[in-house]
Image (spheres, rainbow, N blue to C red):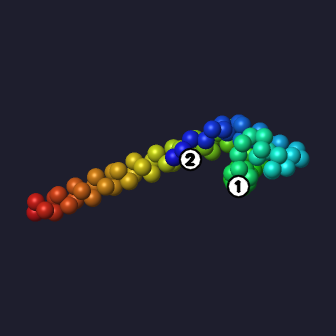
Amino acid sequence: MKKSRYSPQQIAKILKEFDNGKTAAEISREYGISTAAFYKWLERYGGMNGKELKRLKDLEEENRRLKQMYANLSLDHQMAKEIIEKKL
């Protein structure tokens, strides 16, 4: 997964500017992001502060790693079952 070039605190600051009256087009030009990316952030992280946003990102990353670990273990288990079945 591609790492965002903006930290959770920066994203929270950008969304705060929108809440304070800046338009999405102005923010997009200023920070060099697409309006689609901005609205995606707004939908996903709207109303969160920097700490909450960082915690959410950390949890998402941990969840991704755990899913990967589960997939690897599941594959190993399936291979072991097939090997055992062939020996019998």
In this figure, which residue is indicated by the disc labeled 1?
A: 36
Question: Where 71 sits versus 50, above or below?
Answer: below
Q: Residue at x 66, y 37 (%)?
A: 7
Q: Pick whichever, 83 or 10, lies toward us.
A: 10
Q: Earlier in the sequence, mark 2 or mark 1?
A: 1
Q: Residue at x 63, y 45 (%)?
A: 56
Does dot 1 land on a helix, a strand or a loop?
helix
Q: Residue at x 89, y 47 (%)?
A: 21
Q: Residue at x 33, y 51 (%)?
A: 73
Q: Quadrant of residue 87?
A: bottom left
Specify the amino acid type for callout 2. Answer: Glu
Q: Residue farthest to the left?
A: 88
Q: Quadrant of the C terminus?
A: bottom left
Residue 8: percent from left, percent from top? 67, 39
In this figure, which residue is indicated by the disc labeled 2?
A: 60
For the residue carrying disc 1, how many other residues have a C-alpha within 10 Å: few (<14), some (14-19), or many (20+)? Answer: few
Q: Pick whichever, 87 or 8, lies toward us.
A: 8
Specify the amino acid type for callout 1. Answer: Ala
Q: Quadrant of residue 86?
A: bottom left
Is any part of residue 1 visible from this angle?
yes
Contact between labelled residues 1 and 2, with CB atoms less than 8 Å apart: no
Does dot 2 land on a helix, a strand or a loop?
helix
Residue 50: percent from left, percent from top? 72, 38
Residue 61: percent from left, percent from top? 53, 44
Q: In the picture provided, is 51 more to the left or to the right than 18?
A: left
Q: Quadrant of residue 3?
A: top right
Q: In the picture provided, is 46 more to the left or to the right than 57?
A: right
